[in-house]
Image (cartoon, rainbow, N blue to C red):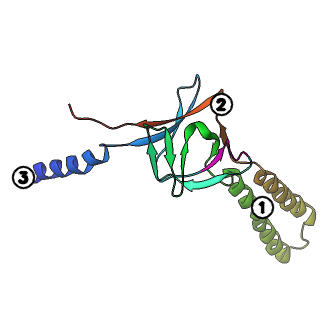
């Protein structure tokens, strides 16, 4: 009985403080119920109205819901000044393209080993497989990361989801 009571009180203590205050930066698309939430501690790339050609990369230190602003390590940016936001320097397809470009080594090694045991080596099919993997991987690496442009379709909001006791 005492162990159960102790365990319940420890769990309430640990998880109660985790829910006490939560600030979130939310990307909303008009007419779409799905949202993207960004929490303090995440790294983002931001393009502002003052510098439309420069992407500023930083970790979100804090969010100010009253001022509708984001606090970075060296500056504070209001969300109305943000023109676009993205989350990675390179897209997920970039890594897949790199892996695909390296994957030509497996059939090449297999064909070399098989060709040394049972000649001749089929160079034509090896060239098709290896060249195709390299070209397709290079094309995948050209895909840019997803950018969220703010304006008519999307908006940013800083929300404070603090639970207040009754």
Mark 1–mark 2 distance (CA, rounded to whole Å): 38 Å
Mark 2: secondary structure: loop
User: Residue 127 vs residue 42: left or right?
Assistant: right
Q: In this view of the protein, which residue sits in the foreground, 7 or 35?
A: 35
The residue range painted magenta reads 45-52
Contact between labelled residues 2 and 1, with CB atoms less than 8 Å apart: no
Instruction: Give the residue drawn at x 77%, y 51%.
Output: 140
What percent of the width, then of the height, locates residue 56?
64, 53
Q: Residues within 10 Å of mark 2 (few under 14, many from 20)?
A: few
Residue marked by disc 3:
2
Q: Is residue 49 magenta?
A: yes
Along the polypeptide, which appears first: circle 3 or circle 2? Answer: 3
* Residue at position x 68%, y 44% in the image: 50
Figure disc tally = 3
Residue situated in front as seen by the camera: 7 or 38 = 38
- Is 82 inside the magenta-drawn segment? no
Residue 92 in the figure: left or right of residue 9: right
Q: Position of residue 109 (x, y in %)?
A: 78, 71
Residue at x 78%, y 69% (from the top left corner): 110
Sequence-first disc among 1 and 2:
1
Q: Are marks 3 and 2 in contact (CB under 8 Å)?
A: no
Q: CA distance from mark 3 to mark 2?
A: 57 Å
Q: Secondary structure at mark 1?
A: helix
Residue matched to label 1: 101
Say which element carries label 3.
helix
Q: Nearer the viewer, residue 126 or 131?
A: 131
Can you tell which of label 1 and label 2 is closer to the viewer? 2
Q: How far across and how far down the image is residue 43, in percent?
A: 55, 54
- Marking on residue 151: 2
Alpha-carbon span between mark 1 and mark 3: 60 Å
Q: Quadrant of the C terminus?
A: top left
């Amino acid at each position: 009985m005492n162990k159960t009571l102790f365990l319940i009180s420890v769990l309430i203590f640990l998880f109660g403080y985790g829910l006490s205050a939560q600030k979130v930066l939310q990307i909303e698309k008009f007419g779409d119920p799905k949202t993207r939430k960004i929490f303090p501690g995440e790294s983002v790339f931001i393009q502002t109205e003052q510098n439309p050609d420069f992407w500023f990369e930083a970790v979100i230190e804090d969010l100010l819901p009253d001022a509708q602003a984001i606090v970075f390590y060296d500056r504070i940016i209001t969300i109305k000044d943000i023109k676009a936001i993205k989350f990675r320097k390179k897209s997920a397809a970039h890594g897949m393209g790199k892996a695909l470009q390296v994957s030509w080594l497996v059939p090449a090694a297999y064909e070399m080993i098989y060709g040394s045991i049972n000649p001749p080596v089929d160079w034509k099919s090896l060239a098709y497989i290896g060249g195709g993997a390299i070209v397709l991987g290079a094309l995948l690496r050209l895909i840019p990361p997803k950018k969220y442009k703010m304006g008519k379709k999307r908006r940013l909001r800083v929300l404070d989801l603090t639970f207040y006791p009754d």
